[in-house]
Image (spheres, rainbow, N blue to C red):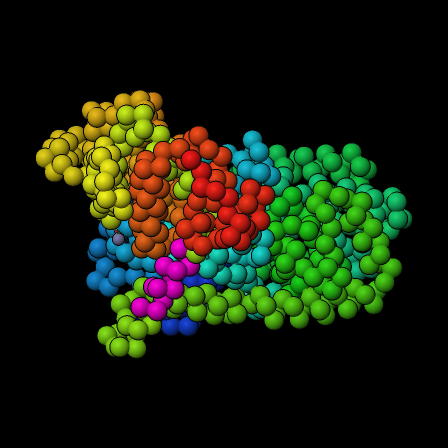
Amino acid sequence: MKRRLALISEHASPFGVLGGVDSGGQNVYVGQLAKHLAAMGYTVDVFTRRDHTLLPEIADWVDGVRLIHVPAGPATHVRKEDLLPFMADFTGYVLQFCKRQTVTYDLIHANFWMSGLVAADVKRQLGIPFVMTFHALGRVRRLHQGKADEFPDERFAIEDRIAAEADAIIAECPQDEEDLCQLYHADPSKIVIIPCGFNPTEFEPLSKPLARVALGLPANERVLLQLGRMVPRKGIDTVIRSLAHLVQDYQTPAHLIVVGGDGNDFDSRITAEVSRLKAIAAEVGISDRVIFMGRQRREMLKYYYSAADVFITTPWYEPFGITPIEAMACGTPVIGANVGGIKFTVRDGETGYLVPPNEPVAIAERLAYLYQQPELLSTFRQQAIKRANALFTWQTVTTAIARLYERVVAENQPEQRSTINALALIDRRFEGALTALQTSRQQLQDSILSAAAMLSDCFQQGGKVLLCGNGGSAADAQHCAAEFVGRFRCGDRPGFPAMALTADSAVLTAWANDMGYDNVFARQVESFGKAGDVLIGISTSGRSQNVVQAFTVARSLGMQTLAILGGDGGELRLLADHCLLVPSSEPQHIQEVQIVIIHLLCELVEQWFVAPSSVVSRQPLANHLQAIERQLGKAIAPDGKAIAPDQFPAPIG
Ligand SMILES: O=C(CO)[C@@H](O)[C@H](O)[C@H](O)[C@H](O)COP(=O)(O)O
Ligand SMILES: [Zn+2]
């Protein structure tokens, strides 16, 4: 059966004009991917914002690919920095569109964070799994661009959510994967590295002399090329300065062709950047050697790549960067900045050189060296062609992406009823639970201890515990309250005052019905809570609004808060005084660990009540670690070394 796919690319349409501020690699990525998927037998709809009044709602693009122009925001160009407010309409349209279709999509592939937001919301409503390609990450951008980054701050939390909820994430290079894990706590098992591609019929090595004739460039001079979007972060100024060094320090005259943007561009940011670059060329005395060609038609680009001796691209950072691959495919060695995707695509000393960003002298030194070794240039040329064609054609890339889609679709399909499948599932789920328990055991011991100490102190000082959560977490909240009020392992103790805010159906239904669901817990915290009490919130995502609001009210009352969470912890992680974050992104395994944590909290609080002198607030943490380890049959000395059981210190108290 032909699979139906939806590609979402809110600002970058395959129709987009290349070289503008907001159009670049992503337009190509989405277009090429869609075409190649269609050639493999998939039916593809590309959802992109309708940014021109003449665009029809639905347009057949190539066989098997339709462009769906989504009416969200004005039918004119809007900077991508300003698009977020229109995304709710975008989602609404996609949901309506899906309902209108007789067949539903098997999978959504979202491109860029705002499309990821749409995909995550559609998944919540319709259960369609989604694969995510970020193309660029907000936190990386903010790090490099600081105040020049005009995307709204909401981007960070939205990207966190996408990283937690996507079924699979495509990292475009190892650096991208590292950023996703470190800056977004993405689950490494969900990430697959698949680079961007090029089209070998579009980019192939042409004869350099002929390419130069075609462009009217001198046959026997040194020619360098810079090509791409005209924005400051691309570091075109560095390339211009490097040419000055090459000419002046190494007596190696050359010309630099700059392709992209246009002096008469409609976009003032491009015009400003071109003027800035021209001023720099003048300042370093090489105005006559830097030739600004403006934006060029895509079919002309191979002539530029082929005409150049070396392609130079030295951005401050680069999520992936498709131009070095296009240059290599045309047989042009690349000098690239040692950042992001470039350090993955360009092999230093094999297909070109990697240099630090913002270092014109380093570029000039490499260029001078290359021009002194023509045979090296020719070896690099051969190796560049080979590498580009072996790893980065759209055919190879699409095959890898399709394999990923099939995996995600299979994981989301109910398995055929067979004993073998059932046994495999049982095995997988136990394995998942064990892994989650194992990592939690390693990571959460200290925070479980301090959470138990806080609860213990609360009860000792006459406070009470309120609990809330939704669905499975509501059941866990009641379960926990029952352990505290009743008893856990200790036969004879008074009840501890604990109450689940999920249990009174009259209060819940009245408040939800009359006032809304988001503050059903907040209202009860307001009614029952006081300073010295503790609120426990249980959530797998950390994003349930009614729990978030309950925490806000609890804090304002001077209560302590404890969040038992999973995934990236969402908003609650930041709100809670104490947070127990289960290191898993699978709700079911998060819940499985959460109940172990809840039982541990009950057991510790109960134990410390019965043997009060060992309450953690009055004893150093190491004593409590020993108490726990003693139960496990081993002990840890205060210096962290294991103690043999016969050398255990005497029990405390
Ligand atoms: O038990 C489960 C999933 O295993 C569900 O009932 C789940 O608890 C519900 O979907 C909740 O509404 C999810 O809320 P939260 O964990 O994200 O706060
Ligand atoms: Zn559950």
Residue 335: percent from the left, percent from the top? 72, 54
Q: Report whether 523 appears left or right of 159.
A: left
Answer whether residue 430 is magenta in the image. yes
Residue drawn 58% across the image and 57% down it: 174
Residue 186: percent from the left, percent from the top? 46, 51
Q: Nearer the viewer, residue 206 or 226?
A: 226
Residue drawn 51% across the image and 44% down it: 649
Q: Report whether 207 appears left or right of 415.
A: right
> Quick check: can you spot residue 18?
no
Please identify the quadrant where the N terminus is shown: bottom left
Residue 187: percent from the left, percent from the top? 45, 54
Q: Nearer the viewer, residue 616 or 578?
A: 616
Answer whether residue 379 is magenta in the image. no
| 480 vs 191: above or below | above
Main structural element of the magenta stretch: helix, strand or loop? helix
Q: Nearer the viewer, residue 530 or 78?
A: 530
Residue drawn 40% across the image and 33% down it: 613
User: Which corner quadrant of the image does residue 496 belong to?
Assistant: top left
| Image label count | 0
| 482 vs 577: above or below | below
Q: Report whether 124 appears left or right of 322.
A: left
Please identify the quadrant where the C terminus is shown: top left
User: Which corner quadrant of the image does residue 107 belong to?
Assistant: bottom left
Residue drawn 26% across the image and 74% down it: 416
> Quick check: can you spot residue 366?
yes
Residue 421: percent from the left, percent from the top? 30, 74
User: Which corner quadrant of the image does residue 167 belong to?
Assistant: bottom left
Q: Which residues are magenta?
A: 426-437
